[in-house]
Amino acid sequence: RRRSGVRSREFFVNMRKGQLIKPSFFSSGVWSGLIKLRTKKRKLRETAVSFNDIIERSDRLLESKKLYLNENFSIDTLAREVGTNRTYLSRSIKHCRQENFAGYINRIKIEHAKRLINERAEGVCKKPQYNNPLDLEDIAIASGFGSRRSFVRCFRQLEGITPTQFKNHIIIYSSNKK
């Protein structure tokens, strides 16, 4: 291996100097190793670009169609909508967001829940189907969580405070603002 590294360095030095390369260099296997290395680097760059493209498409779909609000939402559903397979989608999320699919979706659900809490605390969202405009059970279900318990656990994990503490902070902030 060390020997082929020396040869490859010699190749690039000679190429810069404009010198002719010995025919033995091409038959030594070093040349094919260099080609494989360049091809591998190119594929990695292309993969990173396509990972970003998949994440951008999934973000747009999740924002426009709000797929995460469906209780039966899965990685297969999102992969089908994005136009890729579940493995590639999962790798894209891991590469670009440094989290798994569940963490990615839970983060989006929590952002949605925070918007709902904020709207309801400020009285912007007055829907008749909600008796208590700040009921966490309603917010959990409206954000795509199966239960209040999973919602509170996920909220605390991502935000560092409970939804009730967040709600109280919003109420205090909005009352001081007036």
Image: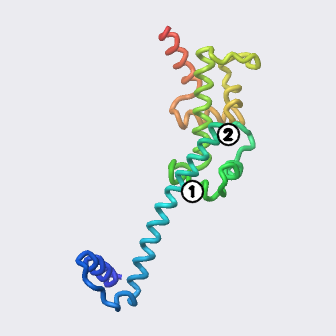
Q: CA distance from mark 1 to mark 2?
A: 19 Å
Q: Residues within 10 Å of mark 1 (few under 14, many from 20)?
A: some
First of labels 1, 2 by sequence position:
2
23 versus 40 height, above or below: below
Badge 2 amino acid: Tyr
Element assignment for label 1: helix
Q: Position of residue 55 (x, y in %)?
A: 56, 48
Instruction: Residue under label 2, please give it.
Output: 68
Instruction: Residue under label 1, please give it.
Output: 91
Q: Which mark is residue 47?
A: none
103 horizontally vs 67: left or right: left
23 versus 90 height, above or below: below
Residue drawn at the location 23% of the way across and 77% of the way down: 17
Q: Residues within 10 Å of mark 2 (few under 14, many from 20)?
A: many
Residue drawn at the location 60% of the way across and 58% of the way down: 88
Q: Position of residue 159 (x, y in %)?
A: 52, 33
- Name the image quarter holding residue 8: bottom left
53 versus 17 height, above or below: above
Q: Position of residue 26 (x, y in %)?
A: 38, 87
Number of callouts = 2
Q: Residue furthest top?
A: 178
Residue drawn at the location 59% of the way across and 38% of the way down: 108
Element assignment for label 2: helix
Badge 1 amino acid: Arg
